[in-house]
Image: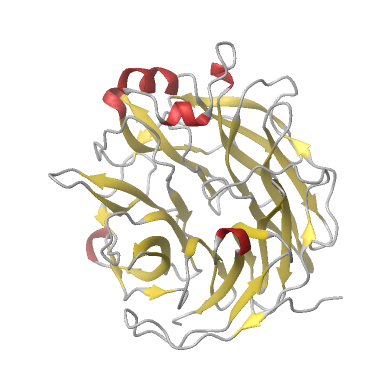
Amino acid sequence: MFAAIAAIVAGRMSPVSDAAPLADTVTLRVDGRANATPWVAASGAFVAVAWGASADGKTDVFLAVSRDGGRLFGAPIRVNADAGQARLGGELPPRVALAARAGREPDIVVLWTARGATTSITMARSADAGRTFSTPIALQAADAAGDRGWPALALDATGAAHAVWLDHRGLAAGKATTAHEHRDAGEHDGVAMAQKSGLYYAALGARVSQERELTAGVCYCCKTALTVGLDGTLYAAWRHVYPSNLRDIAFTLSRDGGRTFTAPTRVSEDRWQLNGCPDDGPAMAVDRSGTVHVIWPTVLPGPEPQGALFYASTRDGRTFTPRMRVPTLGSPKPSHPQIALDASGDIVVAWDEVINGIRTAVARRARRAEGNRVAFSDAIRLALEGPATYPVLASAADGFVVAWTSGAPAASVIQVRRLPSDH
């Protein structure tokens, strides 16, 4: 039975915004568990939110569906077949994507990282709008050793699923190096270890592609990004480890459905030198014209280095516009950016940052301005009280849908809010 789980009507917006009044905020949860790490996808009025629900040290992937643009959601359904085997985090949430079907509700594909003898990039599909899921399929080779995770997912017009992820199997032949050790390596070791960590790709659809490494030298604990244009072009972005431990965002594309990819391109030469992984990767979206929009975090050098978010775009996949700083609320470390576009090309970006000692989820609308730049509107605080982290975005029929993790870690919930269209 399709029933609402919970709905909380919030009050007025924070004074940082003069936009429309705060829409209803829906709370998604599995009772008795800590609920976190959401991802959201939308196709018209159909919205799907996937997240992790944890108890007693074990985590499952759950999914809830809305048929009215995110106003009301059905009861959550567990996606993973083996109980408690999901490995999730803020930078490696489950990913969900929708495959539109004429005259029917969309197929739903969920991708997550699973625990086992080794970690596994795992995918399941629902052909009945989230009521049931197929037996999960592992995308990496059956004998792939070592650690892997931080996957991203995109579906093309045929419904084929494409995935990228970070893979540590190059280190498995030596000592068992953990993600923590990789993150905290020194300058020389960090660059050398990155060369043993790769960006991998696989596809699953009418044509199944065998997994393969697209490039080595990745920064191992930052989320990846993957999207597909209307013409079927695939775009991927990740944080790369360049010589001297410079950790900038890299980009590649495929115009032949994933058979070949271009050599990696540097999105911006930020020259952020770091002897470890920042656990904070890029996000990306593509508009109807094929322009790709990228947002990412970095650190500005100086006597007191400061974190910042930047935006850039590309039309040809080879050159990017000069980076443009995204205005935040002024904390020293805005983090975890996301971006989404609607059919008109309007942009919404979201992130979180610490304000008055509390991590706060924030969003801004943006529109294209002169010279391939964008103009940002006032900031919108997504929650009125308590911690709010890792916001994620999708464009729905009449606006944007935003989801984030709210509350104390042991009793956290997923909150979902609509940002109505300006049109």
Q: Residue furthest left?
A: 303
Q: Is residue 343 above or below residue 286?
A: below
Would residue 134 be seen by someone viewing this image from the given angle?
A: yes
User: Residue drawn 37% across and 18% down?
Assistant: 189
Q: Residue 195 or 212: which is nearer the viewer?
A: 195
Q: Residue 23 or 187: which is nearer the viewer?
A: 187
Q: Quadrant of residue 359?
A: bottom left
Q: Where is residue 323 drawn, in percent x and y?
A: 26, 50
Q: Is residue 99 above or below residue 119?
A: below
Image-based side of 398 in relation to 221, left or right: right
Q: How many marks?
A: 0
Q: Is residue 298 above or below residue 137?
A: below
Would residue 218 be seen by someone viewing this image from the given angle?
A: no
User: Residue drawn 37% across and 81% down?
Assistant: 14
Quarter of the picture holding the N terminus: bottom right
Q: Residue 410 or 375: which is nearer the viewer?
A: 410
Q: Residue furthest top?
A: 174
User: Residue drawn 43% across and 63% down?
Assistant: 350
Q: Where is residue 376 drawn, in percent x and y?
A: 30, 70
Q: Quadrant of residue 262?
A: top left
Q: Where is residue 67 drawn, in percent x and y?
A: 72, 75
Asked which colour scheme the image uses, the reply is secondary structure
